[in-house]
Amino acid sequence: MAVSRDRAEASRDGRSEVAFGVLLFAPPALGAGTWTATGSLNTPRVDHTATLLRNGKVLVAGGGDLGGGLPDPTLASAELYDPVTGSWSATGSMVHARHDHTATLLSDGRVLVAGGANPSGLLQSSELYDPATGRWTATGNLNTARESHAATLLPDGKVLVAGGAGPGSLLASAELYDPATGHWSPTGSMHTAREEHTVTVLARRNVLVAGGCCGPTGALASAELYNAATGIWSTTGSLNSARRGHTATVLESGNVLVAGGSDGGDVMASAELFDLATGSWSATGSLNTAREFHTATLLPNHGGEVLVAGGDTLSGVTFVALASAEVYQPTTGAWATQGSMNTARTSHTATFLATGKVLVAGGVAGPPFIALAGAELFSAPTALELAPSLVANSTGVGPGKALANKATAIQAAVNAGQTAHACARIKDYLALVKAHTGKKLTTDQANDLTTQTTDLATELRC
């Protein structure tokens, strides 16, 4: 799914050019990606959490059922998604119903849920889910009740919780949970109180917090770094644009991609990159559709691209849930549209599965806004899946067995993990297709084979 390095458009008569040992294409980055429905949640929910467990299942917990007409729409229930069967099953319910909480996978495989809110108010409580038993048990309380905070697992196995909405005001305070003792302890406070911010773990035991609510305009541009070794926060470069309801994703390069959100008034399409080495932000390509409260998922099986899905945007003065999705290509800094989900949704969850697919679950659709039980899967073929298809489609066409033989050589290199060798064979294959276009290959045949080869080269990042 990553776009070829130094790619440029060089199409003549529907054929791709090869120059300087680099393939020069202009194909869609991920034309084969698809969205398919999978089993629905047993209970519609929004503002829940989703956590990938070590056994490959996904734990969804809490949230609210806005469409149930219940006096208490907050949920204590939890469910498990099994990628093998594509179905959800009930598991133990939490001790306390909650929404806008956090869920963090611990080093020992348990899941820590902390804070949030329910009709009784803000929550200080925390609890642990044990996948081995399917049960929740209470653990130490936060020092300060909070919701809409951020939480992340640190390299030493502790959990950092920062910010959020507290009793009567936004919070700058942060706390550490120690799984060995089950207790929370205060750590250094942020310089700026905030909620609806993002938190990402970076190199050298640094944690980046960026944006959130609420500055003078309703959103913050400031960013801070937490040093896990010292427990101290330091300011770093500010975002180019204040934003809340955005996403932050650590790329394979170590840079952080922030995308979308709201500046407190308008929904945003802009995106920017944080460089830890310089402590600065730089603009990158803008989303095709402005959106907030979407999801962003790193796709390690597709060259480290980032899938953004759903969210909501403004249509006139009305917020409207989105079904559209797009992919960020780190090599070019551009976004490519990637089909649409079957159901428009915002405030949902997205989880990268061990199967290489992305599970999207719950959220709300609208207007009118109602909680969703539906779930769906995003998938795109990998190089290991594309290569056999190229062999099959090359058999029996063109100059004798030459194309089939070259396609087989490409597949062998892909299967052996020899990316450079596969890219070289792709170059040879495209040259042969070009040489025989209009002769032993029709233009349509050549275009089809070129598109398939281009998709494969894109996956390999040739």
Image (cartoon, rainbow, N blue to C red):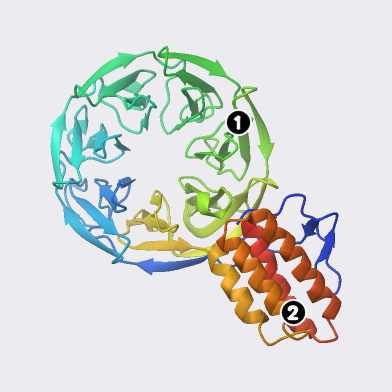
Going by the numbered disc 2, the residue's amino acid type is Ala
Q: Quadrant of residue 403?
A: bottom right
Q: Quadrant of residue 19?
A: bottom right
* Picture layout, residue 443 above or below residue 351: below
The quadrant in which the N terminus is found is bottom right
Dot 1 falls on a residue whose secondary structure is strand
Dot 2 falls on a residue whose secondary structure is helix
Residue topped by disc 1 = 274
Q: For residue 402, which numbered disc appears in the image? A: 2
Q: Nearer the viewer, residue 411 or 167?
A: 411
Query: Relative to 373, is 189 on the left or the right?
Result: right
Query: Relative to 161, is 256 on the left or the right?
Result: right
Q: For residue 347, which numbered disc appears in the image? A: none
Crowding at mark 2 (Cα within 10 Å: few <14, some 14-19, many 20+): some
* Picture layout, residue 95 above or below residue 187: below
Query: Relative to 352, is 411 on the left or the right?
Result: right
Give coordinates of residue 200: x percent, y percent.
47, 32
Q: Would residue 285 be visible to someone looking at this image?
A: yes
Q: Nearer the viewer, residue 417 or 143?
A: 417
Q: Which of the marked residues, 2 or 1, is nearer the chain's N terminus? A: 1
The quadrant in which the C terminus is found is bottom right
Going by the numbered disc 1, the residue's amino acid type is Phe
Give coordinates of residue 214: x percent, y percent.
46, 27
C-alpha span from label 2 to label 1:
48 Å
Q: Residue at x 62, y 76 (%)?
A: 391
Q: Residue at x 27, y 16 (%)?
A: 185
Give coordinates of residue 143: x percent, y percent.
24, 19
Give coordinates of residue 399: x percent, y percent.
78, 84
Q: Nearer the viewer, residue 286 or 451?
A: 451
Q: Would residue 42 be visible to someone looking at this image?
A: no
Q: How many marks?
A: 2
